[in-house]
Amino acid sequence: MSIQLEKPSLQDRKREVLQPPRFDAGRNARAKIGFVLLPNDQLVEEDMVRMAPPGVGVYFSRARMPHEISTGSLAQLTQSIAETAGRILPDDTLDVVCLACTSGTVAVGEARVREELNRGAPNANATSLMGCVTKALEALKVRRLAVGTPYAQELTDNVVGYLHQTGFDITSYAGLGLDYDREMVRVTPDYLLEFAAGLDTPEADALLISCSALRSIEIVEELEQRIGKPVVVSNQAMMWNCLRLAGIEDSISGYGALLRRL
């Protein structure tokens, strides 16, 4: 004769919590930084995670715009910057929020970018990638620079013109003639090293590689050693300025003189 054992009910399995949960400040105790990305961006997330020091959280959302990278398509970012910024940690606050596009800042206008970012994240320090680049160049006391971009001629001219109007003397510049992020992200670091080194001029105080879609952080240290002067690249400058705005002053090695001098 078999004996049927009664299964315990869910109520029987329930255990009492003996004490309330314990909390600490979390992984982002020092700062929370949000980035508005282009829809096809493939590098910023990984680059920011690589460079973020302990205790700094980095968070992302993607804006809407056409696939082609041109002055006209980038200007359409204006319509979605605020809404995109508002989707980054919507139930929490950010310390800093940044539009992660150099040429997009030029197309929309830096003041308008900050305004739109603060519509979506009103309590954050708002900045832009181009704003980060100019702050980085100023911190390095650069007045004359050589510039390389992956863009087509019109967009390269616009970026260089913006830098010139901001007060920098451009000693040489060139673009790679590319229209799409999917092409820019595949430019090999060794080619990028040779391309950028070839743009340097004796009178330049520093060299700038513009665009968040290039694998520039992988070659910035070697490039600085080769040309013997500071190199600023978009994603390195963006992390530097966002940390600065968040009050983070760590020295970070491996990504050029700019981040080592925090």
Image: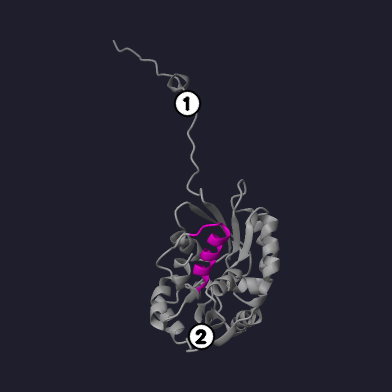
SS at circle 1:
loop
Q: Position of residue 41 (x, y in %)?
A: 53, 66
The span picked out in magenta is 233-249
Quadrant location, the N terminus: top left
Q: Is residue 159 above or below residue 30?
A: below
SS at circle 2:
loop
The quadrant in which residue 142 appears is bottom right
Q: Is residue 246 magenta-colored?
A: yes
Question: Which circle's residue, 2 or 1, is located before the other in the chain?
Answer: 1
Q: Residue at x 52, y 65 (%)?
A: 240
Q: Which residue has dot 1 on it? A: 19
Q: Viewed as shown, does residue 228 lie left or right of 72? A: left
Q: Position of residue 32 (x, y in %)?
A: 55, 53
Which numbered dot is residue 144? none
Q: Mark 2 and 1 residues: CB-CB less than 8 Å, in contact?
A: no
Q: Which residue has dot 2 on it? A: 204
Q: Position of residue 24 (x, y in %)?
A: 48, 40
Residue sitting nearer the eye, 213 or 27: 27
Q: Is residue 259 magenta-colored?
A: no
Q: Residue at x 44, y 67 (%)?
A: 260
Task: Name the amino acid, label 1.
Answer: Gln
Q: Residue at x 54, y 76 (%)?
A: 141
The 10 Å Cα crowd at callout 2, few under 14, some 14 to 19, many 20 or more, is many
The quadrant in which residue 36 appears is bottom right
The 10 Å Cα crowd at callout 1, few under 14, some 14 to 19, many 20 or more, is few
Q: Is residue 47 above or below residue 56?
A: below
**Extreme top residue here?**
1
Task: Name the amino acid, label 2.
Answer: Ala
- CA gap between label 2 and label 1 equals 64 Å
Look at discs 2 and 1 and give the one toward the viewer: 2
Regarding residue 215, the answer to whether it shows in the image is: no
Q: Main secondary structure of the magenta part?
A: helix
